[in-house]
Image (cartoon, rainbow, N blue to C red):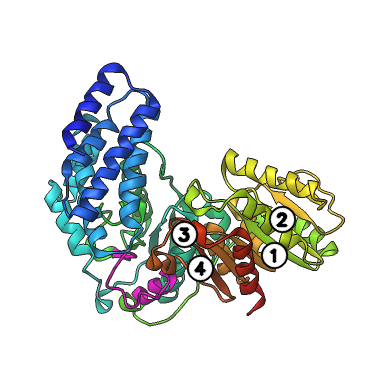
């Protein structure tokens, strides 16, 4: 569509006082038009990005700003990051540098501008040049100094931290056995990494669904955290950036170049298109660390989480021959989900296996909890034993059945590690399951990009299988019974 039409609509909405639905619709249209121009017409249209930035910073109503920011990041930024293609990576760099340039011109972006200028990046072009150089560079093994502390930046999403960050932590810990390991990220990481030797979580949040400028405030919090961690060891630190949102995938600097390791997880020139991200992380570590090696993803589940779930696991084992944990959460990305009929049939099929008990993770948020409640009620009507617990309330399991569990990430990881197998959609739980060493079967829907699916294939010491379902273009080519058959075929043909 002609950009002038979008501009006219925007002016009308500002003048008349827009409703949330109107702003949401316009923001999505602008974002999609930008992607169409770039990916299919080979035109980079900066107007669209500037318009989205203006819309995302114009309202006193924080929800309106957040909706536009959500379209900008959800459609444009994440859309460019998910393809693992060189063209999309280059476009992403231009988009992010343009967003940053817009924000630092705002009165409320003065601190962002000051911090970037302190690193010597005063223009959009200089920041873009840094990004281009960074993606081609590697630290040279022979020039590495032995650090007293290694600071890892969280990937923000739990699954990526298990699949990638846990690998890099192990590899760097092996290379520098005397260094303290610090992980900058969410408090949730304590549940997964808190029991790791030499690992300490420095709590720091990133607003994945927040306002535009708040995302860059997190970067400034990273700078302060690194300064705080570096001071006691006289600056003898290294920072490992596994393509983190905290630096907007390497766009924003955090320390001088000689102390900064950047894993370009979206490198289209990687050694093999067949590799998962966990395997690529190992190959990258072999190129930058003194000694070659290989580490599978892992978790270091904290003692509190293990203690919390111990009673439930013990009770289940008394009455069941087999325990399967199922996660049907999709983290708000409904494209990854099949329908409720599939989910109900899958759970019922599993429950018909003699002596089998299912743990159903309630997922995150009210919507996923309500879906779990509806599934549990439908199974109860069919005659299956059903229970629900938040791990604080009493439960009275006396025979195999299904238990829905509402708990934190550390607790679900402990439950998964105590299970015999895991089945679920593409989510953090598939990576946790593979990392804890149990057979993992992932229903992978919502993407027909083979490279994307292979990159996010969970890696572990036990069997890990993907059951891909083309929900985007071939609804007529599969049915729910067939998908369930494919899951069971993978489970029974090891």
Residue labelled with disc 3: 474
Residue 458 numbered tag: 4
Magenta extent: 260-285
Sequence-first tag of 1 and 4? 1
Q: Secondary structure at mark 1?
A: loop
The numbered mark at residue 418 is 1
Report how far apart the C-alphas of labels 3 and 2 lie in the structure: 41 Å
Q: Are marks 1 and 3 in contact (CB under 8 Å)?
A: no
Quarter location, residue 12? top left
Residue 483: x, y in percent?
59, 64
Mark 4 secondary-structure assignment: loop
Nearest-to-viewer mark from 3 and 4: 3
Position in image of residue 274 (x %, y %): 40, 76
Q: Is residue 269 magenta?
A: yes
Could you give the CA–CA distance between mark 1 and mark 3, rounded to whole angstroms?
37 Å
Do labels 2 and 4 touch, CB within 8 Å? no
* C-alpha gap between disc 2 and disc 1: 9 Å
- Are the two marked residues, 2 and 1, in contact with CB atoms closer than 8 angstroms? yes
Task: Please tell me the numbered disc located at residue 309.
Answer: 2
Whole-angstrom CA distance, mark 2 to mark 4, is 24 Å
């Amino acid at each position: 569509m002609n950009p002038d039409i979008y501009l006219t609509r925007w002016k009308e909405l500002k003048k008349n006082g827009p409703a949330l639905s109107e702003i949401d619709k316009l923001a999505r249209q602008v974002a999609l038009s930008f992607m169409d121009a770039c990916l299919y017409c080979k035109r980079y249209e900066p107007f669209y990005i500037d318009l989205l930035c203006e819309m995302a910073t114009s309202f006193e109503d924080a929800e309106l700003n957040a909706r536009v920011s959500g379209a900008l990041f959800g459609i444009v930024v994440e859309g460019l990051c998910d393809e693992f293609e060189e063209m999309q990576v280059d476009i992403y760099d231009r988009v992010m540098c343009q967003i940053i340039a817009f924000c630092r011109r705002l009165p409320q972006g003065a601190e962002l501008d000051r911090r970037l200028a302190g690193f010597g990046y005063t223009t959009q072009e200089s920041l873009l040049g840094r990004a281009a150089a960074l993606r081609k560079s590697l630290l040279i093994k022979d020039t590495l100094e032995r650090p007293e502390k290694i600071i890892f930046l969280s990937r923000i999403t739990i699954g990526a931290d298990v699949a990638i960050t846990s690998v890099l932590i192990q590899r760097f810990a092996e290379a520098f056995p005397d260094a303290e390991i610090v992980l900058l990220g969410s408090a949730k990481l304590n549940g997964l990494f808190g029991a790791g030797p030499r690992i300490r979580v420095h709590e720091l949040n990133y607003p994945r669904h927040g306002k535009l400028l708040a995302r860059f405030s997190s970067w400034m919090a990273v700078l302060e955290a690194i300064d705080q961690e570096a001071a006691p060891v006289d600056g003898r630190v290294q920072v490992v950036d596994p393509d983190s949102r905290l630096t907007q995938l390497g766009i924003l600097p955090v320390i001088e170049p000689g102390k900064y390791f950047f894993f370009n997880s979206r490198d289209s020139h990687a050694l093999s298109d067949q590799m998962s991200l966990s395997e690529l992380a190992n190959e990258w570590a072999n190129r930058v660390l003194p000694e070659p090696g290989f580490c599978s993803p892992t978790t270091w589940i904290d003692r509190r989480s293990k203690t919390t779930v111990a009673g439930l696991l013990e009770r289940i084992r008394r009455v069941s021959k087999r325990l399967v944990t199922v996660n049907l959460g999709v983290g708000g990305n409904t494209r990854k989900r099949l329908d409720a009929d599939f989910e109900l049939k899958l759970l019922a099929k599993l429950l018909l296996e003699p002596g089998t008990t299912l743990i159903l993770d309630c997922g995150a948020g009210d919507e996923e909890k309500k879906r779990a409640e509806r599934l549990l009620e439908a199974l109860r009507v069919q005659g299956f034993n059903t229970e629900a617990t938040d791990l604080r309330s009493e439960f009275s399991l006396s025979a195999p059945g299904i238990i829905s569990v509402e708990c934190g990430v550390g607790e679900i990881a402990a439950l998964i590690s105590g299970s015999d197998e895991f089945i679920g959609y593409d989510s953090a739980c598939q990576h946790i399951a593979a990392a804890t060493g149990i057979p993992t079967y992932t229903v992978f829907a919502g993407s027909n990009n083979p490279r994307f699916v292979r990159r996010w294939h969970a890696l572990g010491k036990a069997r890990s299988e993907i059951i891909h379902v083309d929900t985007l273009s071939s609804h007529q080519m599969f049915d729910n019974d067939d998908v369930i058959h494919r899951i069971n075929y993978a489970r029974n043909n090891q």
